[in-house]
Amino acid sequence: MDQAFEATIAFAIFLAAFSVSQYTAVAVYESSMDRIDKPRLEAAACIVASEILMQNGNSSERWSSWEPVCEPGCYLSPAPGVEIAIRATCYSIDPSGGITRIWIKQGPAMHPLGAGAQKYVSGIVLGDGTFVRLEVYASDGLSGEL
Amino acid sequence: MGSLIRQAISPQTKGWGRGVALIFDCMVACVIMIIGLAAYSSLATQAPPEPDQCLGDYATHVLSFLDSNGCLARLIEGHDSSAVRRAIGELLPEGASYCLCVYSPSWELNWSFSSQGFDWRNAAASSPYLVSCESNPEPYLVTLAISE
Amino acid sequence: MDRSVTTIILIASLLASGSLFASTSAAFWERASMVMEESAVRCMAFQMAAGAAEAASEAAQSGTAVKTYVIFSEEALVEASGTSITVVSTFKGSLINASVSLMGRIDIQPSKISSSSFIVTAYPNGTAIISVSGQRAEGI
């Protein structure tokens, strides 16, 4: 076979192998960063939810007048690159076990589910017997709209 | 090994030079590497996500809310699974599945039901919750597991 | 051009590009591992702050003291005071630290502990203490 043809094939194989190795290296690096970042976002969501629960306690009046503030700097510092979304839903239960949604408060978007957002869910039974489900989503702001 | 494979799969290559033999060896090495990477990535993506610990705590809060005015006891006593399903389904976050188990005080399973899509591998369960019923002097032990 | 000269130039350029690639890759991975270590330490600080906030919230709800365990994969020094938590870790001989402050109503007692597993004890009045099992926190 022609040596030039052999050299061309060898160079093509080298390029392919080099591209695969570079692609793999970058993918490994990105997945490692994601794996490290995920617990940080989970922790940020947990901090925000815990502080909201501490702030409002089990008082139905405080929860009624409360409005979600989606600025992460209000809950933790420093918070570079952390975006949060909050949704709180209040339910009541009648003696037959029927559940009624009383109110829902959320911000900043109607659909706070970003692709890489981490979620923390908590619940609290209020003094008047109603129940509040609090969902906090934390995202690094790069994985889609919160 | 690559050379052996080459000879086995294409006898007409016997007349080719050393350069071509090396190229085939490289190709075999690349194929093995790509198959390995594909197998690893498919295994990594199929691994179930770890259970979210906060969901276990949330399940405990849900049980205490359902028990707050005796509803949970009445629903369990009446074996009214459709009412319990509706109540729990309303209280869970979007996309969550659940499994409710009711045990006797000696941890014998009385009855249980789970929603569609529930997976024990990534589920977080509540602490055992004691529910007292009027008709039964012994309390029930109830656990609620949630998976996403 | 003479065939031997061409071969020498080819081999030299191959060696030069190979060594350049190797050095660039080494620099990239050194920087990447540093960035990953910094992220890991920042993550530890967030996890410790989350443990304190979660325990304080549960204590406020239940009206009793609540203990939470925070476990890291490696040993780290945790300094806490007021609303601020700092985690310090060593990486290739250099110290990397990260801090997180909680803006809520939580008061963490001053402590400075080196371990990989910590206990956060929170009380209903909003105070929290970070300690290691079987060891008292040393006051700053």
Image (spheres, coloured by chain):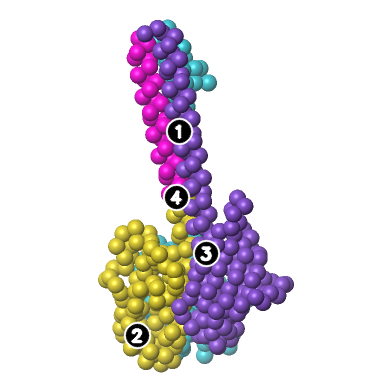
Chain colours: A yellow, B cyan, C purple
CA gap, disc 4 and disc 1: 23 Å
Q: In which quarter of the image is residue A25?
A: top left
Residue where numbered disc 1 is placed? C21
Q: Does the magenta stretch include residue C140?
A: no
Residue occupying image coordinates x 44% and y 69% = A78
Residue occupying image coordinates x 63% and y 60% = C75
SS class, disc 2 = loop
Residue where numbered disc 3 is placed? C98
- Residue A145 horizontal side relative to residue B123, left or right: left
Q: Which mark is residue A66?
A: 2
- Disc 4 marks a residue whose amino acid type is Ser
- Label 1 is found on which chain of the structure? C
SS class, disc 3 = strand
Q: Residue furthest left?
A: A110
**Measured from the top left, where is residue A106 in percent x and y?**
31, 76
Task: Work out whether disc 1 and disc 2 sit on a shared chain.
Answer: no
- Label 3 is found on which chain of the structure? C
Residue occupying image coordinates x 36% and y 20% = A9
Q: Does the magenta stretch include residue A15?
A: yes
**Measured from the top left, where is residue B33 in percent x and y?**
47, 33
Q: Residues within 10 Å of mark 1 (few under 14, many from 20)?
A: few
SS class, disc 1 = helix
Q: Which of marks 1 and 3 is nearer the N terminus?
A: 1
Task: Work out whether disc 4 and disc 1 sit on a shared chain.
Answer: no
CA gap, disc 3 and disc 2: 32 Å
- Residue C92 horizontal side relative to residue A7, left or right: right
CA gap, disc 1 and disc 2: 57 Å
Stretch of the chain drawn in magenta: A1-30
